[in-house]
Structure formats: C-alpha cells, structure tokens
Image (cartoon, grey):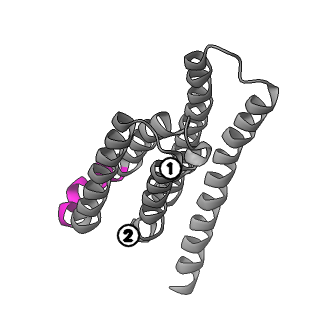
Amino acid sequence: MNLLNLYFTPFAAAMVVSAVYFSEPDATTKYLSFALLLVSLAVNHWFSKNTYRFVGWAGRLKVLQVWLPFLWSAVLAYLLMPYWAPMWLLLTMPPIIAAVNQGRWQTLATAGACSATVLALLWVYQLKMEMPLGEVMWAQGFVQAAFIPVLASFVHELAQTALRMRDVASR
C-alpha cells in the first residue's frame, strides 16, 4: 500500500489542484474539494503509518483502503468533472488498490463499481445541464468506463505474477 500511496496520492493531489487552479470552479466547490483532499491525505497517511500496527484487523483495513478512496474519488469527480474532464482518472485508483491487495473477483467488482460511477456521473451531469451530452461524449464515457476494468485486471495479473516469481525464487 505504501508504494501505491507514493505514486497515486501525489497524482490525486495534482489532479485536484490542477482542476481548481485552471478551471476556477465556484467557491463552494473549491473549498469542498480541498477539504476532501486534505481529509483523504490525512487518512491515507494514517493508514500507511498504522496498517501493520493492527495486524488482526488487516483484512478489514484492506477493504477500507479500497472503498474509502472510491468514495473520495467519486465525490471529487462529481464536484470537479464539470470543470475538469480528466477527473474520471481518480476512479482508476480504487481498482488498482484492489488489484494489489485483493482477489480477481473483488478487483473486478471494484472496477465495475468505478466504471458504473463514471457513467453515472456523466448521466447526472447531463441532467444538471438539462440537455443531452451527445454521442461523442457518451462514447468517450463508455471507453473510459471500459478502461478501468482492463487496467485493474492488468495490474492484478502483474501482482500475481510477481507473487508467483517470489514463491518460485524462495524454493
């Protein structure tokens, strides 16, 4: 998990800061986004420092490490996607966390939830604008949604290959 925090936490922070700086959303959206980002950074830091302290709770903590980032990513994407289209990339992170820490079916379930969230966010955005988004926007949304489980499956297979290689080397 520390490796994921090392790379994905700065990426998420850069996404949110870029979205707020370059797109200039309204003040409420800006402050909610920064508050949520700070809470997520604090919780991620706590997890990275204390995961091994609570060994008996490791299984439950790994589930939380997948679904808390999902919640934060979904809310941040909801807040900032109308201003900054690449915010959907935040929803690639929970399946990657699941791919490293959980089994194939949990990874695919997480990826499915994130893919559905991308499409749901487009649908909500369409309702808020009170006009259809058009074929191109929906096609892009479906391609983005399809990318999430593909990426998660790839990372899961890489992690499993690394484990198999470690097991063979330790014989």
Coordinates of residue 150 in the picture (x, y in percent): 69, 50
Coordinates of residue 67 in the picture (x, y in percent): 39, 43
Q: Of helix, strand and loop, which mostly describes the magenta segment?
A: helix
Structural crowding at the residue carrying mark 1, measured as other residues with C-alpha within 10 Å and reported as few (<14), some (14–19) or many (≥20): many
Name the mark on residue 69.
Answer: none
Amino acid at the residue labelled 2: Asn
Left or right of 33? Residue 159 is right
Front-lying residue, 6 or 79: 79
Residue under numbered circle 2: 2
Left or right of 80? Residue 47 is left
Amino acid at the residue labelled 1: Ala
**SS under mark 2:** helix
Q: What span is colored magenta in the figure?
A: 53-62
**SS under mark 1:** helix
Front-lying residue, 20 or 44: 20
Structural crowding at the residue carrying mark 2, measured as other residues with C-alpha within 10 Å and reported as few (<14), some (14–19) or many (≥20): few
Q: Name the residue located 44 percent from the left edge and 42 percent from the top edge.
A: 70
**Marks 1 and 2, Cα distance to the nearest angstrom?**
25 Å
Q: Is residue 71 above or below residue 89?
A: above
Coordinates of residue 165 in the picture (x, y in percent): 60, 78
Coordinates of residue 85 in the picture (x, y in percent): 61, 43
Left or right of 53? Residue 154 is right
Left or right of 92? Residue 64 is left
In the figure, residue 138 lies in which quadrant? top right
Name the mark on residue 19.
Answer: 1
Residue at the right extreme of this rendering: 135
Q: Quadrant of the N terminus?
A: bottom left
Q: Name the residue located 35 percent from the left edge and 53 percent from the top edge.
A: 62
Residue 55 lies in the magenta stretch: yes
